[in-house]
Amino acid sequence: AQSVAQPEDQVNVAEGNPLTVKCTYSVSGNPYLFWYVQYPNRGLQFLLKYITGDNLVKGSYGFEAEFNKSQTSFHLKKPSALVSDSALYFCAVRDNTNAGKSTFGDGTTLTVKP
Amino acid sequence: EAGVTQFPSHSVIEKGQTVTLRCDPISGHDNLYWYRRVMGKEIKFLLHFVKESKQDESGMPNNRFLAERTGGTYSTLKVQPAELEDSGVYFCASSQVGSIYEQYFGPGTRLTVT
């Protein structure tokens, strides 16, 4: 079975400060990891993914995430937050032996204050 | 290129009634998924089509839910009869075949059962 934990329901940061949204996972095989963002009244938008290779992956809107196999984590980061980054963020994992479903975390609401 | 579309965007029905949700995936995407988010919790997998075949329907809650994908194009998800606990946001996603590919999500259908 595969699972994802996003330990923080809410993350608040000031504009211009760095942000981190945490994610840990559990899978039986090698993990494929994804971050999605949901803006109000919109569907989920893909941000970035880790499949293999460099542990630091870069994605859309200046976001990046670091894969840490020993800690089974895939935290989302951005060096300087914008007010427009305020949204709901979901981490997802897929087992590389399962070409189907993704398992999502509960989501973390990011609020960036001016 | 058009994204994943879903219809309707919002549906309010009474307990015991029937509702049919529709999803049009991105053209050329053989994988189609249905997910549901209930009461602000995690996004839960319902089922996965590859073309017109059901690859995995392990997440379907019970036999009141019926999904079809005739001709391997659009998909419908019927709930009959609807119960109060079926309320939530139903997301459809599509992707290319292969677990390394990210899923593209539709805006969701918000179902309210009263």
Image (spheres, rainbow, N blue to C red):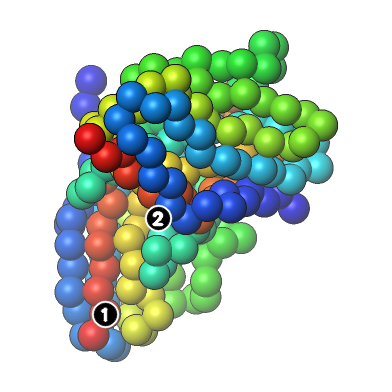
> Dot 1 surroundings within 10 Å: few (below 14), some, or many (20 or more)?
some
In this rendering, do the residues under marks 1 and 2 share a single chain?
Answer: yes
Instruction: Identify the residue under disc 1.
Output: B113
Q: Amino acid at mark 1?
A: Val
For residue B68, which numbered disc appears in the image? 2
Single out the residue that lies furthest toward the bottom. Answer: B16
Query: Is there a contact, CB below 8 Å, between mark 1 and mark 2?
Result: no
Above or below residue B22? Residue B20 is below
| Residue B60 located left or right of residue A87 | right
Q: Secondary structure at mark 1?
A: strand
Residue displayed at 42% across by 59% down: B36
Q: Amino acid at mark 2?
A: Glu
Q: Secondary structure at mark 2?
A: strand
Q: As rendered, which of A11 and B66 lies closer to the eye?
A: A11
* Quadrant position of residue A45: top left
Residue displayed at 81% across by 42% down: A28
> Dot 2 surroundings within 10 Å: few (below 14), some, or many (20 or more)?
some
* Quadrant position of residue A39: top left
Subunit bearing disc 2: B
| Residue A102 located left or right of residue B8 | right
> Horizontal and vertical percent for residue A90?
47, 43
Q: Is residue B113 visible?
A: yes
Q: As rendered, which of B72 and A38 lies closer to the eye?
A: A38
* Quadrant position of residue A102: top right
Q: Is residue B53 visible?
A: no
Q: Quadrant of the C terminus of chain A?
A: top left
Q: As rendered, which of A13 and A101 lies closer to the eye?
A: A13
Residue displayed at 19% across by 79% down: B13
